[in-house]
Image (cartoon, rainbow, N blue to C red):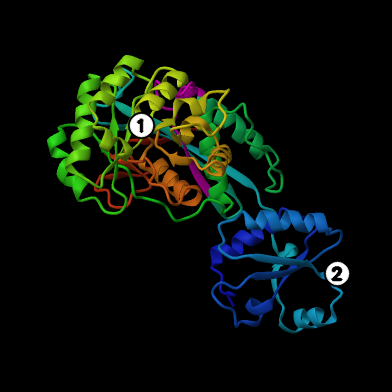
Amino acid sequence: MDFGLTETMIKNIGWHLRHFPNVETAILFGSRGKGNFREDSDIDLALKGDGITNDMLHDIQQTLSQTTIPYKFDLVIHDKITDPDLLAHIQRVGKIFYEKKNCSIQHRRYQLFRYSIPVDSQLILRNRFLKKREGLLVKVCCGQNEGWGEIAPLPEFSHETLAQAQAQAIEWLEKWDQSRSCNVKLDLTADLYPSVAFGLSCALMEMKGRLGDEGNYQTAPLCYGDPDELYEPLDQMQGEKVAKVKVGMYEANRDGLIADMLLEAIPDLQLRLDANRSWTPAKAQMFAKYVKPEHRARIQFIEEPCKTREESRQFAAETGINIAWDESVREPDFRVEKEPHLAAIVIKPTLVGSIERCAELIAQAHALGIKAVISSSIESSFGLTQLARMAKQYTPNVTPGLDTLDLMDYQVVRTWPGSELPVVGLDSEFVTEVILD
């Protein structure tokens, strides 16, 4: 009997219960135990074993609730049940759902793969041409459960190099592996490089079933090239009609004219602009001069228009154009605070850190009514699909900024829905396994 649960869900629950050695047996009761459950029925479990306390029960409840299983858990300690009717019900309909004795000791394993794929010859990062995108794919396993992540420092933006990230990832994985048992936890500490923390957290959460399978693959298209060629594809966009335009690389008046023309031509279009702190206050004002006042409200935000936060705040106050923090989010002194004209924070996990750290920032922003936008650091298709899943899980009503795949010549292992780029696998010339001692 499947109890209305997939095999993956059942394994996932068992995997988490193994982390609590006091739990010898879990008995499924209620409507799922009887077999007449509804699709949204709770998962009722009576836990048996010596030394299970109420505090431990709370911890188990919290752990199971953090999985992506879309049902509520109702747990009881079997030996502490005083209601005779409930005991009789469990004895009558209960089904053995988990037994510790049938769970063999699960050991940890890991692998690293390095990829290097060519990219668009016109891709410039802070005045440097990027000819190829390189990164690591990390695979972690515990028993039959496995998870993957991507570690890909972004040249000119990440403080760590790929070599440094690889060395640190190997060091962490070796420590993680030393205990051999899945029951020993090793935290992703604050001293890890952001790209390493993010990639490892993806792998661990995927292995534990905590990273949702569903992704938000609707993107804000990155607009570049001839503006005349942009009108038709933008006008025909489905869903939320929002696009992203890089500004600050050319004259500010040109940027303002292009933004205004797009907003004029497509009345329901909204824009996100990214200036990367490139403007002086005078240039920022020059940009605003060429955007009609009636169009400014359809600029969702400009990411960091000026070189300092204070200058960006002043620009927003004077023009009424909303801003977003991007680079600021990665600075040690950054705090999420409600500010006039602050519409969003942009979170690039490869540059920020673990999923847990990103989730904290998202929760802080949402509590203040500030939008949080998951954005790409030009990861491969592999990393982009995980960012899409993360966006669906943590920012479900916001279009993420993930439209960077077309800068690549290939997809890596996992594919982006609808992309026609060729796919390279682990056995291709573009991917090599990192030999570990």
User: Quick one: label 1, few (<14), some, or many (20+) residues within 10 Å?
Assistant: many
Amino acid at circle 2: Asp
* Residue closest to the eye, 399 or 200: 399
Instruction: Name which residue lies at 24% across and 30% down.
Output: 291
Amino acid at circle 1: Ile
The percent coordinates of residue 86 (x first, y second) are 79, 79
Q: Is residue 128 visible?
A: no
**Which residue carries the number 2 mark?**
79
| Placement of 376 over or under 236, stated as above or below | above
Name the side, left or right, on which 366 lies relative to 76: left
Name the side, left or right, on which 290 lies relative to 17: left
Name the side, left or right, on which 39 lies relative to 132: right
Circle 2 SS class = helix
Instruction: Name which residue lies at 71% across and 40% down.
Output: 179
Name the side, left or right, on which 14 lies relative to 230: right
Query: Range of the magenta residues?
Result: 147-164
User: Quick one: label 2, few (<14), some, or many (20+) residues within 10 Å?
Assistant: few
Asked if the stretch drawn in magenta spans residue 407, the answer is: no
- Which image quadrant for residue 363? top right
Q: Is residue 271 visible?
A: yes
Circle 1 SS class = loop
Q: CA distance from mark 1 to mark 2?
A: 62 Å
User: Which quadrant is home to the C terminus?
Assistant: top right
Disc number for residue 383? none
Q: Mark 1, mark 2: which one is toward the viewer?
A: 1
The percent coordinates of residue 90 (x first, y second) are 76, 79
Disc number for residue 321? 1
| Number of dots carrying numbers | 2
Query: Which residue, as the protein is rendered here, is positioned at the far left?
Result: 228
- Whether tag 1 and tag 2 are in contact, CB under 8 A, the answer is no
The percent coordinates of residue 335 (x first, y second) are 57, 29
